[in-house]
Image (cartoon, rainbow, N blue to C red):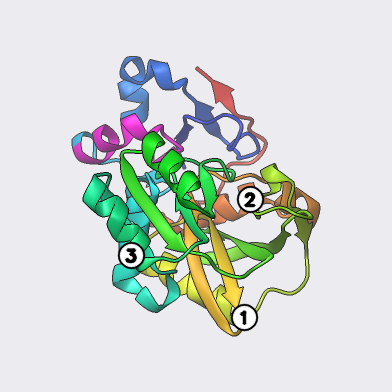
Amino acid sequence: MRVVSFDAFRTLRLPSVTYIKPSHFHQKLSLIESADWVLFPEYWQVNSLHYAMHKKIFPSLASYHLGHNKVEMTRAFQTLCPAHVPYTLILANIDQNQESVLEQLDFPFVAKEIKNSRGNGVFLIENHTDWRHYCQQNEVLYVQEYLPIQQDMRLVVIGRKVVAGYWRRQPEGGFHNNVAKGAEISFDPIPDAAIELVTRVAQHLNINHAGFDVAQVGNHFYLFEFNRLFGNQGLVEQGVRLDLAIWEYLLAEQDPPSQPPLGQHPQAV
């Protein structure tokens, strides 16, 4: 199986993968054309690879397009499984819509930047001053009801299944559940219903490489978002080998299935 990658770090341990610097994309078109798979292209390369070259890419096209920002993924969730999405408003930032948000949501509520990660750009809006400040900084109003939680789950999808999961618990006096913001990782059991929800959504949307963030309120589960590229601290602590899961998926998706070459090392070009 011939594979090229644009992300040396995430594909370092895969066998027989040729690394191409993203800036060398057009200089290496013949090499890309001969590949069975193209792994982890940058977003600006995706349309050219898919529409102009008809290449198989990983993560999937849906993982890129729906994962591009919170608006895209939330609207997909609202269409597919609305009962599992916190009450969310996505509006143009005009005075009328700013007032409309305050008519529909009581303080506190959550406001987010539509394109950010690691807990950055997520704000707890507790009063009018907080709201005015958020509105001054964002062209799109993305707001959600506040859920009474002190932890959430990170479920990692590779291919067509959840391969790992853990809880992320807020630090004392904190608001964010992100590890990058000081949350603690816990490996308490993940509810089967949460795994089933993420599996169903990921398979239906053809999202094959993502970290899903899921909240539990009582016996009900809510999808916050997914990140196409996600941190691996919790996975390292669990001893999860994402490279093996990725390689098994790529092999299974080959037609006909091929075998991985042995004893070869990644190359850089």
Q: Nearer the viewer, residue 150 or 62?
A: 150
| x, y percent for residue 18 | 51, 28
Disc 3 residue type (three-letter): Glu
Q: Which badge, 1 or 3, is on the more N-terminal residue?
A: 3
| x, y percent for residue 79 | 29, 70
Badge 1 vs badge 3, beta-carbon distance below 8 Å: no
- Asked if residue 235 is among those painted magenta in the image, a careful observer would answer no
User: What residue appears at the point 64 percent right and 68 percent down from the top-left corner?
Assistant: 149
Estimate how packed mark 2 is, as few (under 14), some (14 to 19) or many (20 or more) residues with alpha carbons within 10 Å. many
Q: Quadrant of residue 166?
A: bottom right
- Disc number lying in front (2 or 1): 1
| Residue receiving disc 2 | 242
Answer left or right for 230 relative to 109.
right
For residue 108, say whether it is visible.
yes
User: What residue appears at the point 22 percent right and 52 percent down from the top-left corner?
Assistant: 96
Q: Is residue 205 above or below residue 42?
A: below
- Disc number lying in front (3 or 2): 3
Q: Is residue 152 above or below residue 263?
A: below
User: What residue appears at the point 64 percent right and 30 percent down from the top-left corner?
Assistant: 265
Magenta highlight range: 35-51
Q: CA distance from mark 3 to mark 2?
A: 45 Å
| Residue receiving disc 1 | 192
Estimate how packed mark 1 is, as few (under 14), some (14 to 19) or many (20 or more) residues with alpha carbons within 10 Å. few
